[in-house]
Image (cartoon, grey):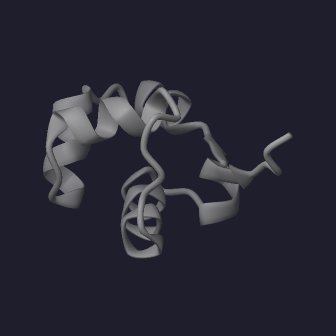
Amino acid sequence: MLDNKIMVGRAEKRWTQQQLADAVGVSRQTIAAMEKNKYNPSLILAFKVAGALDRSIEEVFTFKEEE
């Protein structure tokens, strides 16, 4: 499972979910699902999101072992 700080990064940039979605080429619903940990992005999408938020992938996404 991936935990993420997408919402924090968006808040710092003062972006809406739609603005981030447009920046990385996905729907707003995809961003919403990622923020709620209901969707794990591909590695390519994870790098795009981190880049759009001006952060490293490790700053945005954290892998957690499922119990």
Which of the two residues, 42 or 11, is positioned nearer the viewer here?
42
Q: Where's residue 49, x and y in %?
A: 40, 56
Above or below, 23 against 45 in this view is above
Above or below, 23 against 44 in this view is above
Q: Quadrant of residue 20?
A: top left
Q: Where's residue 21, x and y in %?
A: 20, 45
In the rendered image, the quadrant that contains the C terminus is: top right
Residue 14 lies left or right of residue 29; in this view the side is right
Above or below, 16 against 55 in this view is above
**How many numbered marks appear?**
0
Q: Where's residue 35, x and y in %?
A: 46, 32
* Residue in the picture at 35% in, 25% down: 14
* Residue in the picture at 52% in, 35% down: 37
* Residue in the picture at 17% in, 52% down: 26
* Residue in the picture at 42% in, 68% down: 42
Residue 15 lies left or right of residue 40; in this view the side is left
Which of the two residues, 29 or 23, is positioned nearer the viewer here?
29
Q: Seen from this angle, which residue lies furthest front? A: 67
Residue 61 lies left or right of residue 18; in this view the side is right
Q: Where's residue 25, x and y in %?
A: 15, 59
Q: Quadrant of residue 58?
A: bottom right
